[in-house]
């Protein structure tokens, strides 16, 4: 893979890159319209494929928050055409790395020393490159280390990246009417993710808080080898979750992995009221003992109680069976508004009742089997139904608190990982780890 010697860091460079991409997308649409005139049955698939390739090729050069948006979208497997999912999912694992000279320059800037002066050994080529940073192997004494280096200019370009990606996302993914507060939530979280001092603190806090959960491991972090743009931790041996599942592990191993992952998230959400909000396969390893290893805590979401309480109360069976109470909870969550017409109130009441009745099935039973194809298909069918709902498109806009963005993203990501693992779990087992 070709290495990158520089990254566009100023707004003009980054806008120019996306304008070029916009022109390519326009050309793709012209070709699509021409194909439809001759009744080409593959016209829509070709459009999605061409757009996905052009957008991803642009974002992978920009890196940073622009590429992070693609990574987030790749998790929405039931919400995007498959062409986008397949291409954007490369942002989790396969991104052109920085060249060795640029890596050394980064160390010199922040440590006033080159990496070979700090560590006993340091691999000049990265072993993994993703959206915000890339990882190198190093050793110090008897410690095998992973050193994550943030790409230059990432933090400084977040605001402009969100501003220039916003209109593309609105047009491509039908997000008309979305309030600026939702994009502000994304911008704030991306800003936190580029603060490696904050990540170091959160990683240690999460490691300590979750240490009682069985079959779950975390790296140790080293502040003496870390700074605002570089974070050093133990090198954790293991296979990425997706790679491990391709080895066809036994159902017993799948169940244990799934139970551990579920316990981890439910413990965080219900006990800590803060959680790892980036549940994609690249953030989890499976070691030789078939234990789950969590390796990245850059994105942490805290849940305020005034959101947590109605969020879980709205889907309780007794709430779903009580229409006035259900609508009260929808109002507390900013889904229903005092300005809604009777038609709008009825529409969104019916829509969310249908959605929550299906989507929250796993949390309202004692055990749940994530290999259940009926449940998977119900979720997929609902997503497809809502994506094609013309009435919903016309009503698109501010529906729901800004906290939905990362909480829902986490549940969608968690469910997808659980579907991939195909585990049968005890839903409330996490409670035994609460002190």
Image (cartoon, rainbow, N blue to C red):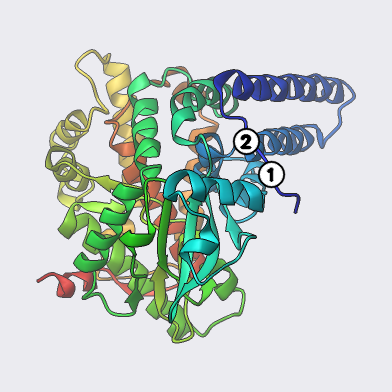
* SS assignment at label 2: loop
> As drawn, is 242 to the left or to the right of 402?
right
Q: Residue furthest left?
A: 435
Label 2 CA crowd tier, 10 Å (few <14, some 14–19, many 20+): some
Q: Mark 1 points at which residue?
A: 4
Work out how far the residue at label 2 is from the one at label 1, CA to CA, in angstroms.
7 Å
x then y, percent, for residue 68: 51, 41
Residue appearing at x 36%, y 68% in the figure: 261
Residue appearing at x 23%, y 27% in the figure: 334
In the rendered structure, find residue 292 and report the number of the disc placed on it.
none
Viewer-proximal residue among 235 and 207: 235
Q: Can residue 76 be seen in this view?
A: no
Up/down of 30 relative to 48, above or below = above
Residue appearing at x 75%, y 54% in the figure: 1
x then y, percent, for residue 248: 59, 80
> As drawn, is 410 to the left or to the right of 249?
left
Q: Mark 2 points at which residue?
A: 7
| Quarter occupied by residue 257 | bottom left
């Amino acid at each position: 893979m070709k290495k990158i010697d520089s990254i566009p860091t100023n707004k003009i460079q980054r806008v120019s890159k996306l304008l070029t991409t916009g022109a390519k997308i326009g050309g793709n649409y012209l070709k699509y319209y021409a194909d439809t005139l001759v009744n080409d049955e593959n016209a829509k698939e070709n459009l999605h494929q061409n757009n996905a390739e052009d957008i991803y090729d642009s974002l992978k050069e920009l890196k940073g928050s622009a590429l992070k948006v693609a990574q987030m979208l790749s998790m929405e497997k039931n919400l995007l055409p498959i062409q986008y999912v397949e291409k954007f999912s490369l942002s989790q694992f396969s991104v052109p790395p920085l060249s060795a000279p640029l890596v050394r320059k980064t160390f010199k800037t922040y440590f006033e020393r080159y990496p070979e002066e700090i560590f006993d050994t340091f691999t000049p080529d990265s072993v993994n490159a993703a959206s915000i940073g890339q990882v190198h192997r190093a050793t110090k004494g008897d410690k095998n280390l992973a050193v994550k280096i943030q790409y230059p200019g990432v933090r400084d370009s977040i605001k402009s990246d969100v501003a220039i990606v916003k209109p593309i996302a609105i047009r491509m993914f039908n997000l008309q009417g979305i309030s600026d507060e939702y994009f502000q939530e994304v911008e704030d979280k991306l800003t936190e993710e580029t603060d490696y001092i904050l990540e170091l603190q959160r990683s240690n806090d999460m490691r300590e808080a979750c240490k009682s959960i069985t079959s779950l491991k975390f790296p140790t972090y080293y502040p003496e080898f870390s700074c605002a743009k570089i974070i050093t931790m133990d090198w954790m041996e293991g296979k990425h979750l997706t790679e491990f599942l391709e080895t066809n592990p036994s159902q017993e191993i799948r169940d244990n992995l799934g139970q551990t992952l579920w316990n981890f998230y439910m413990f965080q959400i219900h006990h800590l009221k803060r959680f790892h909000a980036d549940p994609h396969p690249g953030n989890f390893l499976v070691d030789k003992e078939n234990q789950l290893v969590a390796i990245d805590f850059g994105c942490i979401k805290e849940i305020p109680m005034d959101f947590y309480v109605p969020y879980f109360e709205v889907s309780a069976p007794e709430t779903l069976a009580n229409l006035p109470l259900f609508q009260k909870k929808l109002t507390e969550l900013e889904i229903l508004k005092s300005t809604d017409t009777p038609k709008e109130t009825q529409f969104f009441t019916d829509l969310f009742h249908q959605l929550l009745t299906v989507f929250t099935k796993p949390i309202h039973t004692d055990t749940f089997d994530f290999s259940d194809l009926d449940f998977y298909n119900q979720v997929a069918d609902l997503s497809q139904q809502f994506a094609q709902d013309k009435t919903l498109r016309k009503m698109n806009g501010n529906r729901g608190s800004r906290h939905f963005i990362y909480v829902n993203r986490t549940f969608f990501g968690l469910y997808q990982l659980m579907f991939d693992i195909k585990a049968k779990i005890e839903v409330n087992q996490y409670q035994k780890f609460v002190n």
